[in-house]
Image (tube, helix red, strand yellow):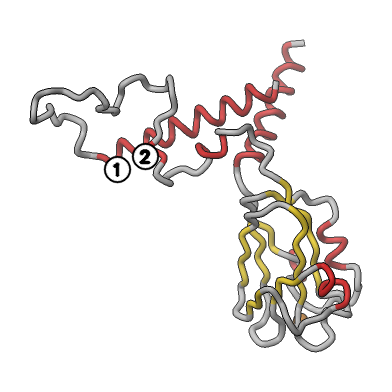
Amino acid sequence: MARVFKTVTFLVLVFAAVVVFAEDYDVGDDMEWMRPSDPQFYVTWATGKTFRVGDELEFDFAAGRHDVAVVTKDAFENCEKEKPISLMTTPPVKIMLNTTGPQYFICTIGDHCRFGQKLSINVVGTGATPGAGGGAAPGAGGGATPAPGSTPGATTPTTPSGTTTPTGTTTTPAGNGASSLGGATFLVAFVSAVVALF
Ligand SMILES: [Cu+2]
């Protein structure tokens, strides 16, 4: 029984790690971004994958042979390449997924889109508990917002002491303290995420 519990805990931890850490996707994997022989190639590639906010798509291709256009649903379905929302021509094209909902990409070179060089994905939220997302970004000024309860009064000189010069013992190495505090915040967020899953 204890063994089962251990296994479940492990699986939950793995799941939590997947939730917390963003993923990078190489579009098409070994085939990269090209005109596929199978028109359904990129449909198949995207099937079964869960794209989340914070994940990154990387389109690799030979410069000049292909490009990546972000387009509307209509343009995607009809392979209209005249007015893309945005067009990237220099590989590798990296696209950070920062909004939820469907996103559409096509190649505007020749008839590549009609031959299946097009990708549609649906981006979902991170799935993490609210508040945990903030801690998931280490180093992003995490030291400014210490997690409540964690490391009580460790490096937070919030008390307005009347003396003009503080002791100055551990205040100067801000970088070191900030990073360790960020790590602690991250740990708290991680643990709370795990707890929330139970
Ligand atoms: Cu192409």
Q: Is residue 19 above or below residue 163?
A: below
Snapshot quadrant of residue 38? bottom right
Circle 1: residue type: Gly
Q: Quadrant of the N terminus?
A: top right
Q: Is residue 91 above or below residue 173?
A: below
**6 with respect to 147 (left or right):** right
Residue beneath disc 1: 175
- For the residue pair 16 and 99, the one nearer the viewer reads as 99
Distance, label 2 to label 1, CA atoms, is 6 Å
Q: Residue at x 68, y 70 (%)?
A: 59
Circle 2: residue type: Ser
Q: Position of residue 5 (x, y in %)?
A: 73, 16
Q: Secondary structure at mark 2?
A: helix
Q: Which mark is residue 78?
A: none
- For the residue pair 141 and 1, the one nearer the viewer reads as 141
Q: Position of residue 189 (x, y in %)?
A: 53, 30
Residue beneath disc 2: 179
Q: Residues within 10 Å of mark 2 (few under 14, many from 20)?
A: some
Specify whether tag 2 is near ligand 1 (CB below 8 Å): no
Q: Residue at x 64, y 84 (%)?
A: 63
Q: Position of residue 147 (x, y in %)?
A: 44, 28
